[in-house]
Image: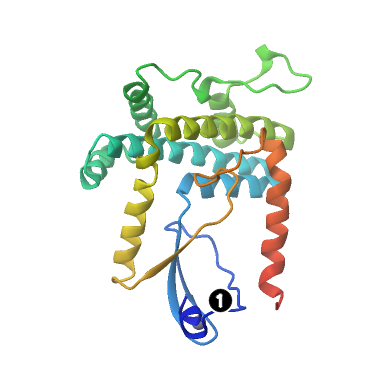
């Protein structure tokens, strides 16, 4: 940003960073300008990508743990959006979240009832109880998402790439379905969690201006074009992006 201010054009310099939990990236360019940049993507968007990247890298088992975490953080996002839509001050929401912050079952409960409150009907089907279609496997022999996730995470089940695509797709479809539902009724409130997160970044940066940036995640709140119909169809795009990511920092345009 500083180079841009000085030169009137963006610098021909790219900096590689490791993905951070807080989404805030402090960087220094070759001229010593220090800037703080916030990634606008929500945690669930980043986590789903980490899962998909693990799959592309040949770690299907690890992919499931990130995809499962993505789903849980999506529940939190959904609850936040509905709370803010109903005029709950953000600080009050943060207080209310504390007692359930470490218990995913309680968060699921809150999510299901916020869904009911918002839609006047219960959520069906709930992703945890859904089963994917897997070639050569009967319906009765197929685990639900919840059972499969528990087997992978708690019992060390070594999932195949095909299974991860099938189960990951359940989560992919589910989150996109709910994003579409939110867009239809709460589009204004959908950006509010992002504003609060950027405000927090402001405090971290001691009030210094922070830049924002978006990254092209597979699951994306800001996406305007239609998402790929199946996770399998979305992966080639990510593969292309991943190759670009690894090449770009070394290239000198
Ligand atoms: Zn600079």
Q: Quadrant of residue 184?
A: top left
Q: Is residue 244 above or below residue 250?
A: above
The answer to which of 50 and 30 lies nearer the viewer is: 30
Q: Residue at the spot x=67%, y=30% of the render?
A: 166
Colour mapping: rainbow
Q: Quadrant of residue 34?
A: bottom left
- Does residue 158 appear in this view? no
Q: Residue at the spot x=55%, y=85% of the render?
A: 30
Q: Position of residue 201 (x, y in %)?
A: 35, 62
Q: Residue at the spot x=29%, y=70% of the render?
A: 207
Residue that badge 1 annotates: 10
Q: Position of residue 203 (x, y in %)?
A: 29, 65
- Does residue 106 appear in this view? yes
Q: Position of residue 188 (x, y in %)?
A: 36, 41
Q: Position of residue 48 (x, y in %)?
A: 56, 44
Count numbered badges in the picture.
1
Q: Quadrant of residue 171?
A: top right
In the figure, is residue 118 to the left or right of 232? left
Kindly give the residue lying farthest to the front in the view shown: 8
């Amino acid at each position: 940003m500083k180079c841009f201010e000085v030169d009137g054009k963006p610098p021909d310099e790219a900096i590689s960073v490791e993905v951070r939990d807080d989404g805030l990236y402090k960087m220094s360019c070759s001229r010593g300008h220090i800037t703080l940049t916030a990634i606008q993507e929500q945690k669930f968007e980043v986590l789903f990508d980490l899962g998909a990247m693990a799959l592309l890298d040949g770690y299907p088992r690890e992919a499931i743990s990130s995809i499962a975490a993505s789903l849980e953080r999506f529940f939190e996002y959904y609850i936040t959006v509905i709370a803010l839509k109903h005029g709950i001050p953000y600080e009050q929401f943060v207080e209310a979240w504390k007692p359930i912050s470490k218990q995913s079952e309680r968060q699921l409960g809150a999510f299901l009832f916020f869904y009911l409150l918002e839609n006047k009907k219960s959520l069906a089907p709930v992703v945890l109880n859904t089963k994917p279609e897997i070639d050569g496997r009967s319906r009765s022999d197929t685990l639900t998402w919840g059972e499969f996730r528990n087997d992978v995470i708690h019992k060390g089940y070594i999932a195949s790439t095909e299974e991860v695509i099938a189960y990951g797709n359940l989560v992919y479809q589910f989150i996109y379905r709910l994003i579409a539902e939110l867009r239809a009724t709460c589009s204004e409130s959908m950006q509010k969690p992002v504003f609060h997160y950027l405000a927090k970044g402001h405090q971290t940066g001691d009030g210094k201006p922070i830049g924002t940036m978006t990254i092209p995640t597979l699951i994306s709140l800001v996406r305007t074009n239609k998402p790929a119909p199946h996770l399998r169809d979305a992966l080639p795009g990510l593969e292309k992006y991943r190759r670009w990511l690894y090449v770009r920092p070394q290239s000198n345009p």
